[in-house]
Image (cartoon, coloured by chain):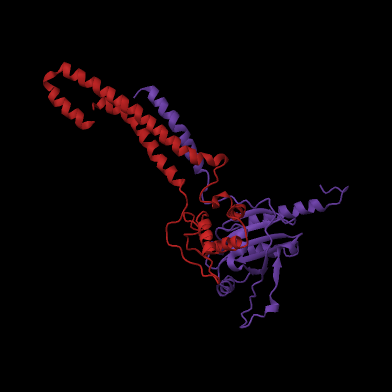
């Protein structure tokens, strides 16, 4: 084979190899969400009562509305009892939720395509959740948030915009990092003109 | 075909084959997204055949987020059923198919459509397979011309140089070609 042919071969193969190498650096399962940066879709979801009473009274149900949560950092975690990976993030979520209890931070666990019975049993087995579980019948809110699997966690800034979406189990480090960032940004905005906070 | 011609021609031949193999993959990706499988009926209180048909048609253009190779129309997953309900509701409320598609794209991103909008960078998906076919045809034409030219020339030299063995050489050349 002549050198010229070898040169042509390399010339043709280089872009192909380059494209494949670039492809290897990307995870095909991670799909970018169009939500970060935009206003978080509003929702009105009922809290799942955890007491195993034979008759859950209608007036004891509380509805969580995103519109009422303005000013808080909201951590919206979608989970299900049949989701194995959700077990990995259960402890970090409950722990970090407890850490920020006295701050304007709210955690909610949205039950995704699961029965109340299974969800309650799962919470009991996992030793409880330090924040409310809310129900999403028909997965309408899940679809509003562009959910394609569980677990998925959305961070909503105090001004109501989605700041970040995490696909897969979220870690305590990521939770603290994102919540800290959002709280700092909010504190920075609220500082009155003329004062120096640096 | 002599060994020499086989070696020099085979590389370009291989390129041509690769180009031709790549083209149909792109053409299939361009598929019209119409579902061909059985469609499970979602029971409704008032069955409206026209609404159901519109819902099916639109659902067939959406990708199931769970079984990502299937359309929302074909997928048996719960989320797909729920998405079909959302489609039906929005169509019944008077939204156009384009508006419903735009709703899902706003929530999931453009990958939710089985067929990407022929716009901007997406045009590459539509144009590239045809370019590959043309390139493949071009390479094959070139290669065939070179093969026939080399084969014809060598036959002449063989017949001249070794007339005794021409009878042996000619049948084997035809067989390899």
Side (left or right) of A109 relative to A1: right
Is residue A131 in view from this perspective? no
Which sits in the foreground, B164 or B156? Answer: B156
Q: Is residue B104 above or below residue B126?
A: below
Side (left or right) of B24 relative to A146: left
Q: Position of residue A170 (x, y in %)?
A: 60, 58
Side (left or right) of B143 relative to A114: left
Residue lying at the far bottom of the rendered structure: A54
Which sits in the foreground, A20 or B58? Answer: B58
**If the image is split into quadrants, where does the N terminus of chain A sit?**
top left
Q: Is residue A141 above or below residue A37?
A: below
Q: How many marks?
A: 0
Side (left or right) of A113 relative to B169: right
Which sits in the foreground, B158 or B28? Answer: B28
Q: Is residue A53 above or below residue A190?
A: below
Q: Position of residue B127 (x, y in %)?
A: 49, 38
Indicate the chain coloured red by its letter. Answer: B
Residue lying at the far right of the rendered structure: A194
Tell me what residue is drawn at x 53 percent, y 40 percent: B123
Q: Is residue B83 above or below residue B135?
A: below
- Chain A's shade in the image? purple
Q: Position of residue A123 (x, y in %)?
A: 59, 71
Is residue A185 in view from this perspective? yes
Splitting the image into 4 quarters, where does residue A11 fall?
A: top left
Q: Position of residue A158 (x, y in %)?
A: 74, 57
Which sits in the foreground, A63 or B110? Answer: B110
Residue lying at the far left of the rendered structure: B164
Tell me what residue is drawn at x 58 percent, y 70 percent: A126
Splitting the image into 4 quarters, where does residue A137 fall?
A: bottom right
């Amino acid at each position: 084979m002549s050198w010229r042919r070898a040169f042509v071969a390399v010339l043709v193969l280089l872009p192909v190899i380059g494209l494949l190498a670039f492809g290897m650096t990307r995870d095909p399962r991670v799909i970018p969400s169009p939500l970060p940066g935009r206003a978080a879709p509003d929702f009105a979801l009922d809290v799942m009562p955890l007491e195993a009473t034979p008759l859950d009274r209608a007036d004891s149900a509380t509805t969580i509305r995103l519109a009422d949560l303005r000013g808080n950092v909201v951590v919206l975690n979608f989970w299900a009892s049949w989701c194995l990976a959700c077990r990995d993030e259960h402890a970090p979520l409950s722990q970090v939720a407890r850490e920020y209890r006295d701050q304007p931070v709210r955690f909610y666990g949205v039950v995704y395509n699961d029965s109340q019975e299974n969800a309650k049993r799962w919470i009991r087995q996992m030793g409880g959740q330090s924040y409310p579980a809310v129900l999403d019948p028909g997965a309408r809110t899940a679809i509003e948030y562009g959910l394609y699997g569980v677990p998925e966690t959305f961070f909503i800034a105090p001004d109501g915009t989605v700041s970040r979406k995490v696909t897969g189990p979220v870690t305590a480090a990521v939770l603290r990092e994102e919540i800290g960032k959002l709280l700092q940004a909010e504190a920075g905005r609220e500082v009155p003109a003329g004062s120096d906070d640096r | 075909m002599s060994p020499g011609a086989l070696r020099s021609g085979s590389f370009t031949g291989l390129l041509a084959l690769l180009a031709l193999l790549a083209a149909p993959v792109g053409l299939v990706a361009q598929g019209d997204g119409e579902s061909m499988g059985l469609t499970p009926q979602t029971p409704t209180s008032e069955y409206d055949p026209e609404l159901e048909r519109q819902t099916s048609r639109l659902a067939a253009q959406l990708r199931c987020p769970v079984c990502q190779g299937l359309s929302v129309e074909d997928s048996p997953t719960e989320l797909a059923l729920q998405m079909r309900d959302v489609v039906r509701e929005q169509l019944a409320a008077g939204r156009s198919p384009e508006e419903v598609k735009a709703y899902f794209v706003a929530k999931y991103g453009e990958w939710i459509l089985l067929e990407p909008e022929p716009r901007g960078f997406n045009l590459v998906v539509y144009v590239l397979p045809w370019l590959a076919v043309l390139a493949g045809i071009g390479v094959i034409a070139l290669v065939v011309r070179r093969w026939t030219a080399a084969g014809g020339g060598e036959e002449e030299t063989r017949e001249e140089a070794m007339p005794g063995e021409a009878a042996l050489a000619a049948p084997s050349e035809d067989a390899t070609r």
